[in-house]
Image (cartoon, helix red, strand yellow):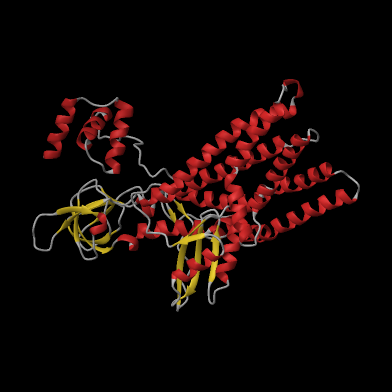
Amino acid sequence: MRTHIEPSGTDAPGEQLIELAVGGMTCASCAARVEKRLNRLDGVHATVNFATEQATVTAPAGLDSTELIAAVHRAGYTASVPAPADTGGDAEPGARAASLSLSRRLLVSAVSSVPVMLLAMVPSVRFEYWDWISFGLTSVVVGWGGWGFHRAAGTNLRHGVATMDTLISLGTLAAFGGSLVALLAGSGELYLEVAATVTTFILAGRYLEARAKRRAGAALRALLELGAKDVAILPGDGSAEVRVPIERLRVGSRFVVRPGEKIAADGLVEEGASAVAAALLTGESVPAEVGPGDEVTGGCVNTGGRLVVRASRVGADTQLAQMARLVEQAQAGKATIQRLADRVSGVFVPVVIVLALLTLAGWLLAGAGPSVALTAAVAVLIIACPCGLGLATPTALLVGTGRGAALGILIKGPEVLESTRRVDTVVLDKTGTLTTGRMSLVDTCVADGEHAEQVLRMAASAEDGSRHPIAEAVLAGARERLGGWRSEERRVGKECRSR
């Protein structure tokens, strides 16, 4: 079952659509900063999606992408024009390496944080120099496990901005530094478990977010993998066909599609007749009969005879590639709730920092000691660290569109996904939409004097080896009702087909 929601419009004349891969973003505030910097350019309208790490830019036709990349670099982040999607379909090595590094940091931080929390919360298990042991373990968590937060906070500080990483870095370092002062002074409260557990929990959130993004991206890669990997081209000089990688196929080339193979590109049938399974596009479980003059779509499966097709659209112009692009654009877009989350995140960090400073000053002016004032200020920073609104919203939309693609539902954009909450009626216009897409044998009706079991056995023998959906339904029904059939009956089936 596949539902294809078509785009509703095109770019205005004199404008171009440019997509950039943005690196270095660690929270929704980073995305808001990059978006703001891009939108300062004349005639540019940009939206930056933190979940997909992509910027979708509508710019004047004469504007070069290098100007956009330079603007992103000035904001403190990296940018590049992504290469065309690889139909080999696997996650980028950089993404896999980053995910592996994050999982290692999370594992080491979790193992180190457990004894720190246990020693802080259960006085009966403490021993001599337990506080220094906790300090050493916390140093690993805050210094190595949370290094990414501190590095991002330093980068943002050089550009005069504050992000969620700033809150995380300030909160954990304040708790860690205050505990160090207390240890050296020999008195005072220790907040080592706060620094260790907060770092670990935020690392866990980042890891879950990265895993959700990879799983959603897998749906797009799976969609790209539906196409053929190679093709048998018929040279124009009448020589024998040559099998080449799909990238070498050009518009106007003639290629051969044998039974069971995928059609390499969109085109027009010139020779042969067959049945083509187009469930990928239409949802119809029964293959459509095609012959000379009929159009066929790349990615569909030839279930019958040999076809010779002349390519009319190849590569990124095929309907399958456009479907994949639709999913990609949907994941890069923003819904109304996500735009609200980005606006909130953009002012959230400075407000929290100001509140933490006011809290520190207020407790000091009230006569409390530095230890109490520092504890209250750190509490404000720590509580604000996760910022679930800026993190959960884009991730939820990303996973939603990715999961839809995995189920065969292609969504134009996140705003469409968001608007489905108001849907109260669904109208379906074709078969296969609510069915499994596979035919099944319901009953065997025979003429008078014939035995249903024998007729089914002969029919299954005749259909043995065929990949047609009706043949597969007959074979499955025979296996279920008869437990298979013997080689002698297969021989009889071959004789029936030969006649």
Q: Position of residue 13 (x, y in %)?
A: 45, 78
Q: Residue at x 75, y 36 (%)?
A: 184
Spot the residue most to the right.
Answer: 367
Q: Position of residue 79 (x, y in %)?
A: 48, 61
Which residue is more in the foreground, 435 or 182?
182
Task: Report the side of 228 relative to 425 (left or right).
Answer: left
Task: Report the side of 450 relative to 176 (left or right).
Answer: left
Which residue is more in the foreground, 97 or 421?
97
Q: How many marks?
A: 0
Q: Position of residue 182 (x, y in %)?
A: 77, 37
Asked which quadrant contains residue 235, the reply is bottom left
**The C terminus sits in image quarter:** top left
Task: Report the side of 478 relative to 129 (left or right).
Answer: left
Which residue is more in the foreground, 347 or 6?
347
Q: In the picture shown, does residue 447 fall above or below 408?
A: above
Q: In the picture shown, does residue 414 fall above or below 456?
A: below
